[in-house]
Image (cartoon, rainbow, N blue to C red):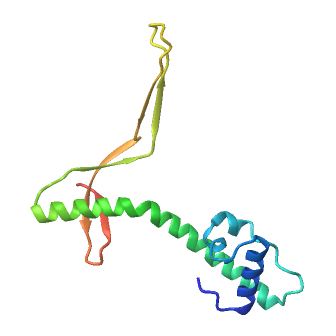
Amino acid sequence: PTTASPAVRQYLEDWATRRHLNSYRRLIRSLDALNHAPALDATLPARAKKEIKTYLKKCKRYVQRDKIRRKLEPLYNRLFEIAQTTKAADAFEELILGLGNARMIMGDDGDGDGSVAVINGPLLEVRVEVELAADGALLVRPCE
């Protein structure tokens, strides 16, 4: 988010100075830093306080969305690639979506070596199809 308000800009610059940073830009990109933002000065006008609080909320939302986007981007790219490949070749590629996580730990099998086996897998598996919408969105839905 842009820092249009002089009150917001001053708050951020003061915060950066207290943290011995040259710029406040690193502060507003860190969810941890935003969650520990310094308290507002009691002498600030109510309007300035509201602008600063609103700005910090926008920054938090942006950082949270960006974190999700960075996690999902590789998945989107891979699904996009699959959708393009199957569309171009008129081929069918089966895609199974695993939901949830199940873990089974099997203890010593009696042979005396103390080995433990761990098996991880999805709770539910669903066969899905991927379709590329006109706007670039990927539509993932269960096969019929």
Q: Residue at x 60, y 86 (%)?
A: 2
Q: Is residue 72 above or below residue 9?
A: above
Q: Residue at x 67, y 77 (%)?
A: 24
The quarter holding residue 76 reads bottom left
Give the number of marks: 0
Q: Quadrant of the N terminus?
A: bottom right
Q: Residue at x 74, y 66 (%)?
A: 36
> Would residue 72 appear left or right of 135 to someone viewing this image?
right
Foreground of the two, 117 or 141:
117
Q: Give percent across and percent down for residue 72.
A: 42, 61
Q: Residue at x 82, y 78 (%)?
A: 40
Q: Is residue 45 above or below residue 38?
A: below
Foreground of the two, 100 or 81:
81
Residue ranking furthest to the left: 90
Q: Quadrant of the C terminus?
A: bottom left
Q: Give percent across and percent down for residue 23.
A: 67, 78
Q: Is residue 71 above or below residue 121?
A: below
Q: Give percent across and percent down for residue 88.
A: 12, 65
Q: Give percent across and percent down for residue 7.
A: 75, 89
